[in-house]
Image (cartoon, rainbow, N blue to C red):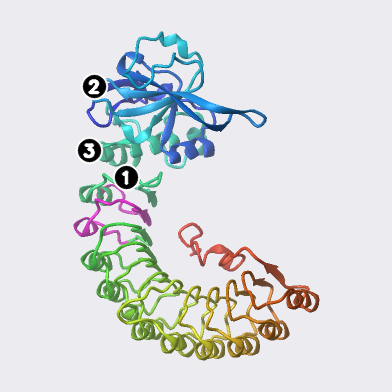
Amino acid sequence: MSDREVLYSCGQCGYPLKLCSSDRSNVGVGANYYKETKKGTICFLNFDESRFKLLDELKCGLYCESKTSWRLHRLRTKLFCRQCDALIGYVNGDGVHSLVGCSGYDSNSDSNSYGNKRFWVKIRALQPDQEPDENYSPSMTDGKAAIESPSSEDLRHLEASSASSETSVLRFFCGVWLEPTLTSLDMPFCGCRCVKLSDFALSILKFKCPQLKKLYLDRCYNITDDGLRSVGFASLELLSLYRCNVSDIGLDYISRACPNLQVLNLSYCLNITDVGVSALGQGCLNLKEMIISNSYEIRGGGFSKCSSLVRLDASCCKLSDKGLSLAVGGCDKLEYLDISHTRSGSEQLGPPGFATIGTLCKHLQVLNLKLCRALDDVAVTEIAKGCQALKEWNLAVCSDVKEAGWRAISQYCKNLEILHVNRCRSLTDASILHIRNGCPRLKRLYLNGCPLVSRVAIELFKRYRCQVEIVTLEFMGENLYELRTLHPLIFPVPS
């Protein structure tokens, strides 16, 4: 076996399976190969049957065999670890073995009976059985090597995610693949396969990659507040902690250790409150973007310290009138605000809270108020008067907005380009007439599910405003800020 080859064993009991990295299928290495690893499987061309228990399985259903061929059943063989009976993978196809049924395992078949069949193995069912050569360190930027060699970028995805223990994860991340010049690292790679990464791994990461600027720790459930103490990257600009078990203590560590942080994702971090958000605002003075959706303990008061914020996503949070007033008062530079799907709490968000947006957010360009059922004509009028720079406004499922509110939008929103009115039950033909006669720069109108709007009103709107596109399928943020506003982690703001 060469230095670049890796043997794999059972991830549950450590039983050697004699699966070698050189036996993996390299067909379609690149985007298609990574797509398969993202599904949680990897393809091997051959394997040693003596290391597995085999069980044939017949499933009934409608299966697509090719573009022109369908069948009503599928025969596949399950591969189990011979020592602990853990499911390792599958062999798909007909005629592989005789049907054994559910009475037990059968591994007495000829190893050549599989022919050119491919064997799909669950990545999380494997762990590395042999440590790679310490002198071998592939380049993180050599794109040609990543396509031609099975031990390149695709191997990093497999071996980092297939490690089932902390020691194995550290071995592949920190011993081989990480480099001192690395500036961006996505830990989970394939969704949720780095759940075993612990706090100790972050301390090693800090030592190995001191110049890291972007760090994604999505779904790393074992990362706690103690681990965030180690995220002391002075150059870190982007940090994603999606669904991590962190609290206000961890946010306080981040505020002290990452002074240059610009983008922070705290979606589904259920243990954080306004106290931690306030600490971030006082420590991270360059913080421009925060995604804190579905954090149910957030009321909004902590954002009063985040004076540098330009984009804020606080959708599905239990904001209050006072909290929202403090938030928009402290974040006077906001250009994007998403407080859609506001959840009911002890202090519900009402019209007075929404009205403060128009009073304090003069630079707002994108506003998402979808499913804010407490929004009424008074609040909409205040927002329309105060936020005249608005380019996109989502008012879908805001049924309490009536003709007076739509009249205010048509009168004051001169720069509005995209308007969402889907499922607004109070929207009438007269409201559509106001929108038709106002909003001179309107380019797109999302209109669907409004029972009081007649077909005649829609046809007249199309006739008099033929340059406006009426769309029934709702999509927030299309063609605005080149999708950076809603997907900043995918389309980062250029420096």
Q: Magenta region, mostly helix, strand or loop? A: loop
Q: Return the disc, 1 or 2, that comes first in the chain's sequence.
A: 2
Which mark is on residue 286?
Answer: none
Of circles 2 and 3, the one toward us is 2
The relative height of residue 144 versus residue 436 in the rendered view (above or below) is: above
Q: Please report the bounds of the magenta region as a residue range.
A: 207-234
Q: Which of marks 1 and 3 is in front?
A: 1
Q: Where residue 204 appears, x then y in whole percent?
A: 24, 47
Q: Which quarter of the rendering shows the N terminus? A: top left
Seen in the image, is 188 located left or right of residue 455?
A: left
Tell me how far mark 1 sits from mark 3, CA to CA.
Answer: 12 Å
- Residue 228 highlighted magenta (yes or no): yes
Q: Nearer the viewer, residue 254 or 219?
A: 219
Instruction: Tell me the residue at 21%/60% (across/down).
Output: 225
Label 3 sits on residue = 167
Q: Is residue 456 placed above or below 402 in the rendered structure?
A: above
Q: Mark 1 or mark 2, which is nearer to you?
A: 2
Residue 492 location (% of width, % of height): 48, 61
| Residue density around tag 1, few if under 14, some if 14–19, many if 20 or more, within 10 Å | many
Residue that mark 1 sits on: 194
Task: Identify whether 4 is placed above or below 360.
Answer: above
Spot occupied by residue 279 in the image (x, y as percentages of width and height)? 26, 74
- Which element is circle 2 on? loop
* 453 vs 120, nearest the viewer: 453
Q: In which quarter of the image is residue 446?
A: bottom right
| Amino acid marked by disc 2 | Gln
**SS at mark 1?**
loop
Q: Which amino acid does label 1 sit on?
A: Cys
- Determine which residue is flagged by label 2: 83
Task: Answer left or right for 374 relative to 227.
Answer: right
Name the foreground residue: 239 vs 272: 272
Instruction: Identify the residue at horizontal 47%, vertical 36% (top origin).
Output: 36
